[in-house]
Image (cartoon, helix red, strand yellow):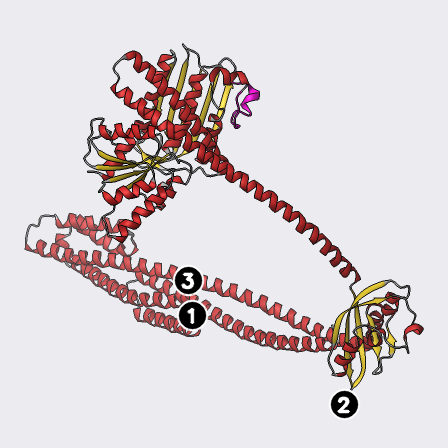
Amino acid sequence: MNSKGIKIVVFVVSIIFIFVLFAGVFLNKHDDKLLDTQVDVAHNLSLSKDLTLKLNNSFRSVYVNYDNLLIANKALKNDIKKIVSHNKKNLKIKELEYIIFKQDNDIDLIKRANSLITNSLQFMKYYHVSNPLIYTEISQKLLDMSYEIKLSDYSFLNLYESEIKNFESLKVKNQDQDNYQKSILLHAKMILKNAKLLKHRLDSFNNYQIQLADTFLSIRKDISHEHAIVKNWMKVIQIVLISLLFIFVFLISKFLKIEKLHKEEEKKLQNIIDKNVIMSIIDLNGITKTVSSAHLKISGYSEEDLVGKPNFMMNYSSRAEEIKEKLQSGNIWSGVISDKKKNGEEYWVNSIIEPIFDEHNKIKYYLGIRDDITNTVILEKLTRNQETIIESQIEIANKERDKAVKASKSKSEFLANMSHEIRTPLNAINGFIELLQESELDKKKQEYLKIVNNSSNNLLSIINDILDFSKIESGQLLIDKIDFDPSKEFDLLVKSFESQFKEKDIGFITKTTNLPKGLNADLLRIQQVINNLLSNAYKFTNKNNNVYLEILYQDSFLKVLVKDEGVGISEEYQKKIFDSFSQEDSSTTRKYGGTGLGLSISYNLVKLMDGVLEVESKIGIGSTFHFTIPVSSNHNKMKKNVISNDILFKGNILLAEDNKANQMFMKVILKKLGLDFDIANDGIEAVKMFKKNHYDLILMDENMPNMSGTEATKAILDLEKSIELEHTPIVALTANSLVGDKERFLEAGMDEYLSKPLKKDNLIEVLEKFIK
């Protein structure tokens, strides 16, 4: 710390010293006040105890001067007022004043009650003596109890009251006895009434005294505690003051030492600068006058080589004229300069040259300071080279990324195209199979149709598996929660498998437990997982064995278990059973079929629903698959519309469809539903026919030649807007069923979405929405 710093510290310490001193004076006065209050409280406690003693003695005395008691209580009140006035913020002391005020009222009541008892007692004694002839044993007992009543407790008062009733029940023989009885009873009852009052008031008074004593003691305790705190603070202040005095002494001695060592430190500082700072002093003619040791060290020159010689920067460097011009105008020059050592080696310095002025504001000399930045310059060169290499690598990486993006886009386009190209013919195939099944009566042909339908559905299932796998792999598959009736939906799922298990002579045992009326979850994906697990159980279980399905709802979780008595799974394969395209060996595919995607898709679907799919299995015994997912119950039984096969509509439909097979299928369906219709082979035809005719609904395919369904929809909407036509509902009927397709069509202005292969029930649901 320098001398200036010591002066600042001394000033601060002086302020602290004064503040602490004033604090000590304040605490001392406060402590005196506490001691005075403690003395007053002790005095009041003594007065209060004396007053209590006098009052309790008065209860047992026939003659007592109550005025002395009131005077004593008044003195107590005056003392309390004095304490209150000195301690206005102390709530406990204010409470004392309130208690003593209540005492004052009770003393007056005790006085009255005691007087009435004494007077009545004297009368009873006098009247009894003056009437010896009608003295009875009961009246004597009553009189004796009257003398003892002031020393009694509440049980004695109850006995006294009972004795009054006994005396009152005595039958009198003459008028004298009647007068005697009435007089005695009058005064006995008065004695009882006032004895109760006296007892009650005295108890109250004693309670006040207990409160007073407790409050007094509590105040004394508080004062003692506060007094102890003040004493502790006084000790702290004393310690602080002594410490500050020591600090004063220390700072003064420190100041003297600093002044003594100041010159020595300046000398040391100059030596440090000389050794570590590359510095030189140059006169106005550019001649070097002084150089530091650090300057000699970095340049390799001796002092004789530089001192008295023209300075390199001021005379020989490429920027010499710039430097001179800047300095002669009184400004500081700074810049990076390359210089050479005595051995010819190049080095770089960040230089600052500053003009130093005298007291007349004239330049005395120039001070040059250098900073060695050779390593920095070399590093910058290396960095620039490295940046060139990195830029080259980034360019290569960007090209590779573009290739990957292009490949991913090509994959997505291929999947979308494959989906569309397969679903389009499947729409006609499945549609005509459904129509034939409705009309065909021959059992053999029905069996053929069933086989064809199953094969078609299997093909659609494979396509759906591949597309679902692609969606999961790209993170595009979303969970869509809806409200549904679990009992109804799971019952339909079970019935869809019963016939298959029955045909293969496999027992199908199901159990549902605690299912609520309504659940909110992704029903489609839950059914898909259960379907996959049951299909696997069906494939790998031989006849005369069993498959079990258990569905349980518990604590907001849906728990599903599928157990079979099939071939089982080896422990090694259980570790990779949920991997994509995974089956135990090639013979499994040949024997049982399948893509190897079912379990992988199921595992990922359960994971997306915040659950886990697990397996337990033993070879030759069977396998158990089970999963648990969180679901919420909505407590409302969901209703599902039942689609009638005999429903008929009335309206005119425009079908935009380029595939001839699908056109034929839709013709049959629309005719069956009683609808009139026109067919457009592409989007351009659809727009032309819309201009000429009125339609109740437009079924719009997307992938059509000349003009797509989306473009046709936009054109129709623009026409409606331009000539203010009433809107005609447009429903997308398309094989485009990837993630985002439905949303894309709805954003384009279509009102609803149907995917191919088309189900008749789905078409009817949409028609009911738009056609009456």
Front-most of residues 440 and 512: 440
Q: Is residue 694 left or right of residue 310?
A: left
Which residue is drawn at the image coordinates 31% and 59% (left, top)? 204
Which secondary structure lies at badge 2? loop
Crowding at mark 3 (Cα within 10 Å: few <14, some 14-19, many 20+): some
* Quadrant of the rendered image containing residue 59: bottom left
Which residue is drawn at the image coordinates 59% and 76% (left, top)? 19
Q: Amino acid at mark 3?
A: Thr
CA gap, disc 3 to disc 1?
A: 15 Å
**Which residue has dot 2 on it?**
360
Crowding at mark 2 (Cα within 10 Å: few <14, some 14-19, many 20+): few
Q: Is residue 458 left or right of residue 333?
A: left
Q: Is residue 758 left or right of residue 469?
A: left
Tell whether label 2 touches label 3 (CB within 8 Å).
Answer: no
* Quadrant of the rendered image containing residue 213: bottom left
The residue segment tinted magenta is 568-583
The residue lying furthest to the bottom in this view is 360
Which secondary structure lies at badge 3? helix
Q: Is residue 506 above or below residue 422?
A: above
Residue 31 screen position, x and y as percent: 53, 71
**Which residue has dot 3 on it?**
215
